[in-house]
Structures are given as C-alpha cells and as structure tokens.
Amino acid sequence: MNFQFQHKEFVWLFAGIAILVLFFIGLIQWKKKVKKRIGDERLVNLLISNFSSKHFNSKFIILSAAFAFGVIGVMNPRLPGASDNINRKGIDVAIALDVSKSMLATDLAPDRLERAKQFISKLLKEMPDDRVALVLFAGKAYLQMPLTIDHSAAQMFVSSATPDAVPQQGTVISDALKMSANVFNNPDRKFKAVILISDGEDHDQDAVKTAKTLAQQGVMINTVGIGSPDGAVIIDRVTGQAKKDDAGNTVISKLNEEELKEIARATNGIYIRLQSSDEAVSALKGQLSQIDRKAFRDTSMINFRNYFLWFAAVMFILLLIEQFIPERLPAGKAGKKYRT
C-alpha cells in the first residue's frame, strides 16, 4: 500500500485558497481606488511611505501556505506500517434499523426496539468476516456507522440506538434503503446485502420501487418484521402512559408484514418475522451464505504512520512567522524610500 490520505473528503477545503486569493486581489484594487480618491499621488505616497507592499504580499503568501498545510493536516496523510496481513473473505452488509416511536410497542418484550437490538447482536457474532454498516431511520434516515469490520464498534452503536437519534418521527423505508445502498463503495453487482429491521408502519409508496432499483444494482434486501399483526400500544417513556392520537384514542401499532414481504421479494431476499432470535439469525445466515464472497484487506489491523502533526506544526510555524513580519518599515528606511 502507498501513501494515502485518511480523510479525502476534506479536499474541498482547498477552495478556501481561491477565496483568499480573490479577497487579496479585491483588497489591492480597493486600495488603489482609495489612493486615487484622496488626491495628489505624491502626497499620498509620502503619507504611506512606511508601508511595505513587499511585506504585505509576503504575509499573504505565508498565510495561504499555512492554510494549505492545515488542510493537508486535516486530511491526515499517512503510510501503512506493520500489519498482520489479514485478508478476510466476506460480504458487505448494511443494517437499517427502525428507531421510530412505534418500535417502543411492547408486543415483543421488553419492547420491539430492544428485541431488534438483541437480534442484531446475535447476528453480528455469526458474521465475523463481513463488513457491516448501520443506518438508523424514522422520518429520515441517518448513516450511524460506515462499513467496518470492527464489530465491537457496531455493537456499541446498536446498543445506544434510541428514537431520540432521529428527531423527525415517522417510518420512511425508502430513505432507509437509499441510505443503505450509499454505503457500498464497490462497483460490483454482488457481495452486497441490506437487512431492514422494522415494524413496517410505512406510508411511503416509494419503498418497493426503491427496492426494485437496488435489485438492479445487485443489492439483496432481507427484511425482518418486528411486532405482531394484532399490534400493541406504544408506551411514552416520559409519562409512562399509552400514546394517544389527536382525538384522544389509544394508538395501536401493528406489524405491516405485506410491505416488508414485497420489498424482500423484489430483491430475491427473504422476509423473517422475529419471534425467536436464534431461529431468525439462522435463517438469515443461510440466506446471506448464498451471496458470493470477496477477499478484502482488513485495514483495521494495519498500524498507520500518521503525519498530520508535521503539517500542523508547519502551519503553526508559518502563522508565527507571519505575526513577526511588519507591514510598516522602520522610520529610517521609510524616509529613505521617498527622499528627494
């Protein structure tokens, strides 16, 4: 492996140099216009005789260089060092977990969300060679964790998932599917799977359409239904009371199996209604085993030599130098500049 940047996504910050250049050019033009407005050019030059345009330009160049070194530091240039040279053979799996308030219904004890978390924890133990990403969704979808082989980190993110993680309530499955598809950074039409865990209370007509689009991209979607068709009340964790609608009626949240089944069918996946976590994990493991597996380097086992501190140090030194460069010349040199 060669020299690389850990955070390439920050390359756009270099646009800041162009903004600085435009600002500098604008400042120079403004100064020229002000000098002309004042009047006699010789008199103006005498008034500003102690100003050094050369020093002023040097300060700008140093500031621009410091900014560039700072951006490079943020991107963290690094070289791979020693590693265990571990190659893993697995698939990429995006787990989309519904954290809407309907997941607090208690038809699965202690509630739907906790049972979903228990299921994910057991599933992760059965897929040690697969890279996993976590997407949380309710009225909107958020990437909680990108693809990683670090399952301990995945466990941590899963255990901390609550309805508070997504402020916009609802259940928009199409957004969750799109976000899940975005985590796959390889062009292959294989090795990719989405596990959608939800009670299916979705009123978004685009969910099945989105699933069909992802199927064309080689993504298999397996759906896991949480809850019961008969439904259950949703307990408000703050008041401890059953949630009511605007008319004062108690809200009953029911598992919508049909939509989840249709999403799975559209991508040659399977639908599982979660009752026994062990049985669900076994069924899902068998389904995922049908996906071709690929070998990839486990970068979590590589010890990188990071160089961001060097660039940060250069940036600091340049800023320090800039502070000690005066824009005004010493009195003797200033007088000599326009002496007649």
Image: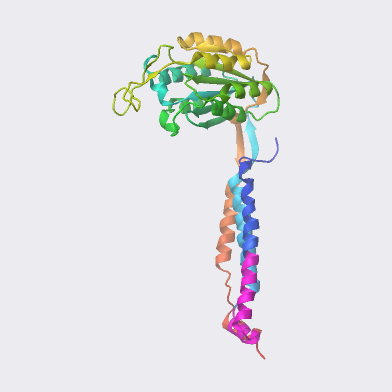
Q: How many marks?
A: 0
Q: Is residue 26 within the magenta segment? A: yes
Query: Is residue 191 among what the camera can see?
Result: no
Determine if the magenta segment contains residue 43: yes
The quadrant the C terminus occupies is bottom right
Quarter of the picture holding the N terminus:
top right
Counting from the top left corner in percent of width and height, residue 139 is at 48, 30
Of all residues shown, which one is farthest toward the front?
A: 247
Residue 229 in sight here = yes
Q: Give the range drawn in magenta.
A: 24-50
Report which quarter residue 288 is drawn in.
top right
Rendered residue at 41%/32% (across/down):
164
Quarter occupied by residue 166: top left
Residue 276 pos. (x, y %): 45, 9
Q: Main secondary structure of the magenta part?
A: helix
Would you place residue 275 above or below residue 38 in this image? Answer: above
Residue 303 image position (x, y, % from top left): 60, 34
Question: Which residue is found at the position 59% from the left and 56% from the top?
Answer: 315
Residue at (64% x, 56% y) in the render: 17
Question: Front-most of 266 and 277?
Answer: 266
Give the camera-side residue of 264 and 296.
Answer: 264
Occupied quadrant, residue 284: top right
